[in-house]
């Protein structure tokens, strides 16, 4: 964006970064800071839904913990279910970071947290789906138990998937 040069009206001068011309195009003025305020209706609505989601997620975690050794919970893959619930909980918590006034730390939390929490959710879902598919595919071929279906190996696979995203994010952040 350009304004009239202060010394020569036939010339234009560029506004410095972070500024824009005023309505007469004679002076540069700072770009006004616009962000979602925690007192706005949109923010209150989002935070209310997130708080409800947090409470429901904690309730489901409590149910899982209470019935931890039942066949239904064990068959669902307890460990990955807890990872999945943790990722969902993080997704709800990131909403509160999104309505804070932007600072370097808040922007870093927003940027990393949004990608990280969804990566945790999708990694757990992918690992659970892959485990079930491998069990059914191995059942057709032989009675031998497929490899890497133990809870520890499932957590390791899930951790590796999340580590790929974290390392990619860190690499991109430090290269940029």
Image: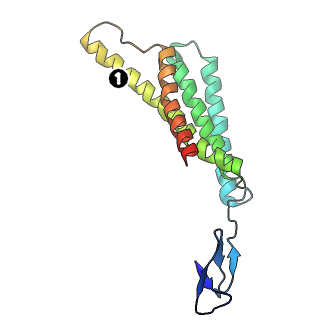
Direction from residue 17 to residue 76 in the image, left or right: left
Residue 107, image x and y in percent? 66, 50
Name the residue: 60% across, 31% down: 86
Q: Residue furthest right?
A: 39
* Residue at image coords 70%, 66%: 33
Q: Residue furthest bottom?
A: 9
Residue at image coords 66%, 82%: 22
Element on which disc 1 rests: helix
Q: Is residue 107 above or below residue 158?
A: below
Image: 159 above or below 140? below
Q: Nearer the viewer, residue 32 or 64?
A: 32
* Tally of marks: 1
Instruction: Provide residue 49's location: percent of width, then percent of height.
Output: 64, 47
In the image, taking residue 63 as reference, residue 37 lies left or right, namely right
The percent coordinates of residue 62 (x first, y second) are: 65, 24
x then y, percent, for residue 45: 66, 53
Please give the name of the residue rendered at 40% of the width and 27% of the height, measured from the top-left corner.
129
Please state if 122 lies on the left or on the right of 136 as rendered: right
Q: Does residue 13 show up? A: yes
Q: Quickly name the residue at label 1.
A: 133
The foreground one among 25 and 39 is 25
Image-quadrant location for residue 141: top left
Q: Check the picture and name the quadrant holding the N terminus.
A: bottom right
Q: Nearer the viewer, residue 52 or 27?
A: 27
Give the class, few, some or many, for how many residues have Cα within 10 Å of label 1's Cα (few <14, many ≥20).
few
In the displayed structure, would residue 148 be above or below residue 4? above
Question: Which residue is situated farthest in the top direction here?
Answer: 144
The front one of 24 and 143 is 24
**One can see residue 95 in this view:** no
Using residue 112 as the reference point, say whether residue 129 is left or right of it: left
């Amino acid at each position: 964006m350009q304004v009239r040069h202060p010394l020569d009206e036939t010339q234009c001068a560029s506004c410095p970064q972070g500024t824009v011309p005023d309505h007469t195009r004679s002076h540069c003025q700072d770009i006004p800071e616009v962000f979602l305020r925690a007192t706005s209706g949109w923010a209150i609505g989002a935070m209310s839904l997130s708080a409800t989601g947090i409470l429901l997620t904690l309730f489901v975690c409590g149910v899982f913990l209470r019935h931890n050794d039942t066949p239904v919970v064990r068959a669902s893959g307890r460990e990955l279910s807890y990872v999945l619930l943790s990722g969902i909980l993080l997704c709800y918590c990131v909403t509160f970071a999104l309505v804070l006034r932007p600072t370097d730390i808040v922007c870093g939390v927003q940027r990393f947290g949004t990608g990280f929490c969804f990566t945790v959710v999708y990694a757990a879902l992918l690992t659970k789906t892959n485990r079930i598919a491998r069990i059914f595919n191995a059942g057709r071929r032989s009675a031998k138990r497929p490899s890497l279906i133990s809870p520890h190996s499932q957590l390791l696979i899930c951790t590796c998937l999340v580590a790929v995203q974290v390392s990619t994010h860190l690499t991109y952040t430090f290269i940029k």
